[in-house]
Every structure is written in structure tokens, then in C-alpha cells.
Image (cartoon, grey):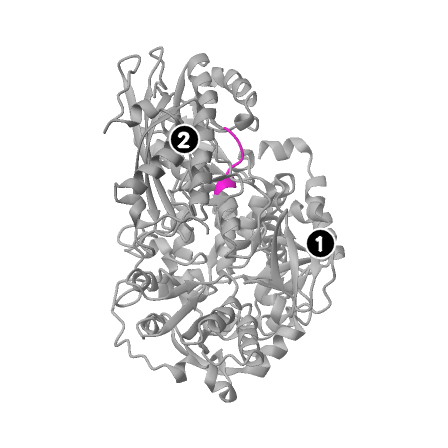
Amino acid sequence: MEQRISLAHGDGGELSHQLIKNVFIKAFGHRDKAMFDAASLTLPGNEIAVTTDSFVIKPIFFPGGSIGKLAVAGTVNDLAVSGARPLYLACGFVIEEGYRLSDLKRIVADMALEAKKAGVAIVAGDTKVVERGSADGVYINTTGIGVYEDEKKPNLAFKTGDAVIISGTIGDHGMAILGARGELGITVPVESDCASLNSMLMKIVKDVEDVRIMRDPTRGGLATTLVEITEDFSITITIKESSIPVREEIDGMCELIGFDPLYVANEGKAIIIVAEDQVDKALSIMNGYPEGKEAVVIGTVSSLEKGRLLLETPIGSKRLLSRLSGSMLPRIC
Amino acid sequence: MLEVLKQSSNPDILKPLLIAVKELAQKFQTVYGRKPAFMEVCGSHTMSLARSGIKQAIIEDVNLISGPGCPVCVTDQHSIDCMIELAEGDGRIICTFGDMMKVPGSRQSLMDAKIRGKDIRVVYSPVDAIDIAEKNPDKDIIFLGIGFETTIPILALLIKDAKARSIDNFSIWMSTKLVEPILRTLLNAGDVILDGFLLPGHVSIILGEEAYGFLPQEYKIGGVISGFEPAEMLSGIHKLLEMVLVKQPLIVNDHRAVVKKQGNAVAKKLMEEYFSVSDEAWRGIGTIPESGLDLRQEYNQYNAKIRHHVNPGEPKKTKCRCGEVIRGFIRPTGCALFGKACKPTNPIGPCMVSAEGSCSAYYQYLREID
Amino acid sequence: MCVGVPAKVIEKQEFSAVVDVMGSKTTVGTIFVPDVAEGDYVIVHAGQAMSIIDKTYARESVEEWRKFTNARSPETILKS
């Protein structure tokens, strides 16, 4: 009979022990750190970065990834865009009673693989099981710890003329998820862009002078993230609609169902703002990585006041962009 | 072929078209001493004109006035309240276009009702509602049937489908509107100076170009049927300008690739079969005789108004001026609530919510940038 | 919401068709366009194909727009 998660897997007894030993530690390793109530870590340097994120995506497995891959890459990227080198992850699982053990193993294997790719260790974890119907399959929380190296961080010293770079096409994740849910009867031949970006971003931080800021445009999409930057730092950014990379199939489907790709989620993209004279260097670094091979400049910091995001349309008009205001979007991260 | 179709948003085509529009508009201003004023009837035109930046680009040259073509916006508050009140009944599933979800009712919105646990589903394709009815035989499925002539044939299709599949737990709350009666009402009232109409491409697919003959014949005003892509809209405005400069009001079909002379015969036949004209209440205008379509009597079993009684009470009075906005009487910015008390996150009127609403278009795309 | 995005019919069934929208695929009803054939482009509204795009007229429109481009030298366009 197919093995499924029961409430007893979360009660701290023998079944919990089995689950931790045979599923989590088997995949993540680090048994030495799991013997105590807390993992004990040694960190280089003084300043550390900590971030946490919960993942509730539906469907749990989707083209280009799974909740497991996403839970690692998402938190790794949050650390990396802040300029920190991701080192450790802790994870918490909330599992619905009756969930297939085989699927849980797939999720955990995806996490282990992505952690390996990103060079991070998963050193602490927790599992809770809730009654059938109280959760939708599996939810995962990951907390990440990273360190700042070489005293180099994005310097936030924005100047007029700074270039705004996006690392690749936008909207892939959100539309891939929408397609995978099957509710609209749409087949989107695009995979989620879900990926850890830390190698590429660490190289940028190390080799490029005057990186102003790095952000990952996840929920709310490119526009919402850029609006946040303009408001947080009171700068005006102007982006050119015709420069923004969007796959044709994403564009077409967005138009058909009334979405705007500017507001569709990404899970493997970074916005990088750098000094004008560093653009070529930044682009050449990014283009050398698979996750940055389509990186392009999409706009500039056009003034150091007002805190607004402007979009220049193909006929040359400019209009103001706001953050996503409410949405009909399904659960995508 | 796709390459041909994509030209409609090619900047190399758009820029010269834009210059041509500006030149003709200047010529008009020289002759008449004022800007030419055109009304885009359709809410999707309002949105596309603003989103593509055309409105902004010709703001000094042409006065583009948003018309009464957003179906949610033109629906009067009592009808909106009735539709929202439907969600309160037990054992019901309300199916709706996404636009309706956040429209403010006097007491609540459908979104509020959904959050409280009411079963309200957004469908992208209305025929999905019939599948929902089939899968939920113990529930009453009600489709909120708002829309103009583009959507009405699809509502007819729902009844046809429900009948063919012997589904009897399905009904439509009809609140549809027709283009001709509202254009006549606006022109009869005469409170807005208009030189021509940018006519809605999609409604025209159904009606055909002959449906607008009354404009030049009875009101001496012309119109151009236009698509929704930037080049199509610019071309439509250019043709309107040419027309007003030679003072020969006509109906020009500038969307011939999709709008046929007689319209869509299948759609017209379906509408005729299931619906008959009805008096409809319009926001800010009141009841206009024979300005919508309702189910014919023989289809009463699919008529939600007959199957389900609701009493939402008197609509709450607000300072919202949507009623004047949809008539082109004021711009959204002329309303004291605009952008202050009324925003997309906290809409007071439907024009701020709908994807086709003028206030929403203004808020999203046309706020001053300098 | 009215959209202008062209959908190409790639597989026709009795009252529906699979359409390709620049690479993504979905199914739309075809009851309003009984003569539709595979390879045709259609305009879709609320899940239904409402009209078949006439290729000759579509080309004519583009030619008409191009006349504005050809009437101007590239310099004047650039300056604007």
C-alpha cells in the first residue's frame, strides 16, 4: 500500500523520528547538527544576513520546479540580492495528513539538489502534520543565513544615469504556474524560471564597482519591485516598454486573459542597478551564466527625486506605473 | 501572417501615424479654434489608448472623451446591489466575470462575500458556468450576465447549452446593455460637444458596420470602427479627423479584417432566439426604454430574476460621479473622490474597479507625470 | 475585456478549436464562426472565437499605415 503521512508523523514519537531520519537527514545530511535542538554554526566575518520566507505554491510540482526547489532558491535569492553569500538554511514543513510519502521524498530531493547547486547546507528543520483539509498538501518555510564578504555590498548611492538591468525574460514563473493549474485550459510551453541566482550575483558584487542595488522581482512582478525601489530611495526610474524582455507565448497569453507581464511573478530573475560605466561589465558577467544569458538594460535612473516609476511606451509617451493593486492571481509562491 | 498582424504595434509604423494625426488635429484647430473632440465608446478602447500612451501623446491635439462602454460602470447601483445580494442565498454558486468581484455594492462587494465563505467563482469563459452546474447538481448556479452586444451572444450560448444538456440548476441574472440606445440618449441630451465617435471593434463584429447608420443620418455625426491595437486606434482617429475636416459624416469601417458589413449572423440569430428588448437602468442616467436585452418568457426557467428574489434595499448614496464620467460629462479627475477617497485599492464607484473603467484607466495610466 | 490578440486555429473540432496564441495554446468555442478552418486567425472574446481575420484586409491595413512611414524621411520621424 502507498505510504502516506499520518498525524502520528508529526507527534514527536517513533514515526516522527523515522521521518526525520529516513527522509530529511537522508537527503540533507548534516546528521551531526540535527542531534541537538539547535544547529551550532560558525560564520566567517561579522555582519550576517538573515531572511525567512514561506512557500504555499499550488501546484506543488510544476514545469521547471517544485515547492522544494522554490523553497531553497527563493530564500537563497533573497540573501544573494542583498549582497550576502548564502550559507545555511533551516526549514519548517507543514504537511497535510494523508500526503503521499513518495511525493514528500521528491520535494525533499529537489531541496537537497537545489541546496547543493547553490552551495548551501540545510542544517535545521521541523515537521508538523495537520488534519486533512487544514492545509493544501505541503507548506514549507525556509530561513536563510548568509554572510557579507570583502566589505562589498550594493552601495545604494544612486546617480542619474544609472542603468537598470533585468537578468532575463519576465513573467515566466507566474504564467507557467497558471498553465500548470489547468483552470483556464491553457497550455503554456514555458517553464518556471525558478533558480538560485547566487553564483551570478556574488560574481557581480565581487567584480563590478558601484552596484547600487539588487532585487528579485517575485510576487507583484517587475513593476511592483521597481516601484518599491523608487519609493524607498526617492528616485525616479524610467523603463522602456520595448526593451523589456517578454517571451512571445507569455505576452500572447497575458493579453488573452487580461494580465500584464509587468506584474506577473518571477522566481529566477534579478533587477540590478549599476553605474552607467559599469553596464558592459555587468552584462558580460551575467550573460556568461545560464540564468543571465538574456540580461539586458531596460531603463535608467532618470532623476534623484520624486520616487516614481515611469514606463516609456513604444510611441514615446510616458506613463506612471503603480504597484500591483490586488489581483486575481492564483497562489504562485 | 502573424508578422502582418504584429505590425499594429510596430513603433516604426506608430510614430509616423502619430505625427499624421497631430498634423491633422492642428489643421482642425486652425479651422475651428478648438480641439477636435471624439468619444471612444468602448471601455477597452479607453484602456488601450491610455496603456499604449496614445492618449498622453495627443492630449494637446485631440480631446478624447471616454464614453459609456464599460459594462460594469454603466450598470446602475440597484442592479449591482441585487447581483451582490444573490450571493447571500444558501446553496448557490455565483459565477461572474472577474470585473464584478471588487465592484462596491451599497453594503459589500462580491469579494467581501467570498471572503466570508460564499461560493463565488470567476470564470474566464462563461460556458464554464454550465460545467460547474453539471458538477454541482445540488446547487443553484447563477451567472451574472452583464455586457454589451459582444457578450450577449455568449450569454445566449449559455442558455442553449444548458437546454441541450438538460441542466436545470442554472440561471442568468441579465443586466445587459445595447450601444445604439445609449448613443442616442447622449446625443439627444447634447451636453457634450462631439465631432465623432471611435466605434468599438468587438461590438461591431456582432452588429456589423450598418448598425451605426443612424449616427450620420439622424445626428449628422460620423464614426470610425476601430480595432484595439495602437496602429488601429491611431488610424481610426486619423480617419475621424479627415472626415470632420471635409464635413462629411459617415460610418467608416477601419477594422475590415474582422468586422463584416452585416456583422455575425450566428450571433444575431442566437440573440434574437433567446432575448427580447427590455428597459434597463443606467448609472447616472436612469431607465432608458428598450436599452437592453432580457430573456424571452419561454426561457423563464433560466431567468435568475424570476427564480431568485432579492431585496437589497435602497442603494447607499455616495459622492461618486461615475454616472457623469460614463456620459463623458466630466473627466475622472473632475470627481472630488478621484485618487483620494477613491482608488483601485479602495474603489467607491465601478469606474475605478473595472479593467475597462475610465477612472481606473486615468488612475493607472494618466496621472500627471510632470 | 476586448482584446486584439490574434489566435491561430490549429485543431478544429465540431464546436470548438485549439488555438495557438503566439506559442501558448487554449481551446475556444467556434459556434460563431462556423466556416473557420485550420490555419485561420480568429479574434477571441470570453472564450469564443467571434470573427475570422480576413488576411487580405489585414495586409491592406498595414500597407495603408506604411504609406505614412514612406511619406516621411527618417530624419523627421527621428526628430519627433
Mark 1: which amino acid?
Answer: Ala
Specify whether residue A200 is in view: yes
Left or right for C70, reference A128: right
Q: Is residue C39 above or below residue B187?
A: above
The label on residue C58 is: 1
What's the residue type where badge 2 is placed? Lys
Q: Looking at this view, is B317 or B249 the one in front? A: B317
Q: Whole-percent x and y of residue B228?
A: 57, 54
- In the rendered image, residue C75, in percent from the top left (x then y), is placed at 65, 30
The disc numbered 2 marks a residue on which chain?
Answer: A
At x 46%, y 50%, the residue is A2
Residue B41 pos. (x, y %):
51, 63
Height in image: B201 above or below A298? below
The local secondary structure at tag 1 comes to helix
Q: Position of residue A159 (x, y in %)?
A: 38, 20
In front of the other: B134 or A252: B134
Would you say A33 lies left or right of A209 here?
A: left
Q: Residues within 10 Å of mark 2 (few under 14, many from 20)?
A: some
Labels 1 and 2 touching (C-beta < 8 A): no
For the C terminus of chain A, which image quadrant? top left
Same-chain check, marks 1 and 2: no
What residue is shown with label 2? A26
The stretch of residues the image draws in magenta is A167-174
Principal secondary structure, stretch drawn in magenta = loop
The numbered mark at residue B84 is: none
Q: Nearer the viewer, mark 1 or mark 2?
A: 2
Measuring 57% from the left and 62% from the top, which residue is drawn there?
C45
